[in-house]
Image (tube, helix red, strand yellow):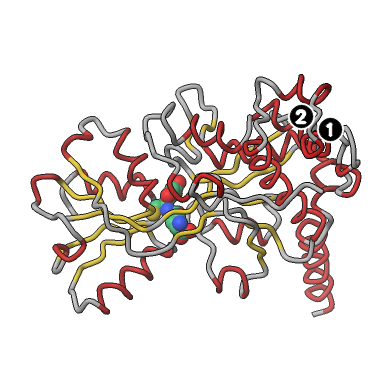
Amino acid sequence: MKRFVIIAAAALAGWASTAGAATLETVRARGQLICGVSQGFAGFSAPDSRGEYRGLDADYCRAVAAAVLGDATKLRFVPLTAQNRFTALQSGEIDVLFRNSTQTFLRGNSIGLRQLPVNFYDGQGFAVRRDANIRRVQDLGGATICVAQGTTHELNLADIFRARRMAFTPVVFERIDTMYAAFFAGRCDAITQDASALAGALTVTPNPAQYAVLEETISKEPLGPFVRNGDDVWANIITTVHYALIEAEEYGVTQANVATQATSSTDATVQRLLGRSGEFGARLGLPINFVATMLAATGNYGEIFERNLGQASPLKLSRGLNGLWNQGGLIYAIPFR
Ligand SMILES: N[C@@H](CCC(=O)N[C@@H](CS)C(=O)NCC(=O)O)C(=O)O
C-alpha cells in the first residue's frame, strides 16, 4: 500500500514537472521546441517528398522556434490524430498544438487547455463526386457521410441534419488517410471536414476534376493554437508570435526586407516590432530582435498564407476571412505599442 502511494506520488510529481513547469524554460533547456501537428493535411502540416513538414501550422511552429530559440530548425514535429491531440498537450508530450484545431467553448473550458488567437477562419464543408448530382447540403438527405472521429464535424453533422430533419449515415474514421481512401473507393456519398482541408486533400488525388467541394458550409471553424492552462508567459509568447506575423504583413515587413527594415525603418511601429526601440522582447523573456529572427525564417502572415494555401500553393485559396482587417478580412493584430 505504502509502496503504491509512493509510486503514485512520484508519477504525479513526474507529470507535474513536465506539464506544470514553465514551458519556456523547458524548451530552452531542451534546445528544441516540440510542436503537435496533424499527420498530414496539405496546406496546414504535411510532410513533403523529403519528409519536411510544410503548411501554415508547420510554419507557425517554425516561427515559435525562431522567436524562442533563435533558430527555426530547433524543432521536432509530433504528428497527432484528432483523437489524441489534446491528451498529448495535457500530458506534456508537446509544448504547443498547431493542428487545424477548432476553438470551442468546451475545448477552452473543460480540459485544462487554453485557446490562443485564431490563425485561420474556416467552416465545415462537404466534398462529393461530381456525377453524384449533389449541389447543396439539402441534397445530402439520406446520404452516407465519411467523417473523422473526435472532431467538431461529427457533432455539427448531428446538429445540422437533425435541425433540417434530414437522415444520414455517418461512417466514422480515426485516421484521415483511411477516411479519404474510403471516400475515393465510393464507400460514402460525401466526405466532410474543414473546407480548407477538403480543398487540400483534393489537390493530392490523382483525379481532382472528378470531385467538387459544395459552396455551402455548415459551421464556424475558428482554427488556432492550444497550450496548457497556467503558463501565462508561454501563452503570451505564442500570442505575440501570431500578432507579430500579422503586424509585419500590415506594415510591409517581409522575409526579404526584414534585415534592411530592422536597421533603417523610420516607422515607429516597425522599429518597436523589430526591436530597435521599446525592448518588447525583454517583457517576454526573449531576445530583443525575436520578431526579426522569426520573420527572416518564415516571412509574415501573408507570406505564410500565400506559400502554403494561396496562389503559390496547389490549394489556391483566396484570403477571404483570412485577409487583413483593412482588406475585408478578420485578421487583426493588437497594436505594438
Ligand atoms: N477542425 C476540426 C477538425 C480537425 C481534424 O482533425 N480534421 C481531421 C479530418 S476531418 C484531419 O484533418 N486530420 C488530419 C490528420 O489526422 O492528420 C476539429 O478541430 O475538430
What amino acid does circle 2 point to? Thr
Q: Which mark is residue 289?
A: 1
Residue at the spot x=79%, y=26% of the render? 265
Depth check, front residue: 209 or 149? 209
Q: Quadrant of residue 21?
A: bottom right
Q: CA distance from mark 1 to mark 2?
A: 6 Å
Label 2, on which residue?
293
In the structure shown, which secondary structural element does the residue marked by tag 1 occupy? loop
Query: Do callouts 1 and 2 mark residues in contact (Cβ within 8 Å)?
Result: yes
The spot of residue 327 in percent (x, y) is 51, 44
In the structure shown, which secondary structural element does the residue marked by tag 2 occupy? helix
What amino acid does circle 1 point to? Asn
Residue at the spot x=54%, y=63% of the render? 103
The spot of residue 263 in percent (x, y) is 83, 22
The spot of residue 58 in percent (x, y) is 57, 38
Ligand 1 has an atom within 8 Å of the beta carbon of the residue at disc 2: no
Q: Quadrant of residue 188?
A: bottom left
Q: Left or right? Give the position of 54 relative to 89.
A: left
Look at the image and tell me in which quarter the N terminus lies. Answer: bottom right
What is the number of callouts on the image? 2
Residue 279 in the image: above or below residue 159: above
Residue at the spot x=33%, y=42% of the render? 199
Q: Left or right? Give the position of 98 relative to 197.
A: right
Q: Which mark is residue 270?
A: none
Residue at the spot x=65%, y=58% of the render? 116
Depth check, front residue: 225 or 5? 225
The spot of residue 219 in percent (x, y) is 38, 64
Q: Residues within 10 Å of mark 1 (few under 14, many from 20)?
A: many
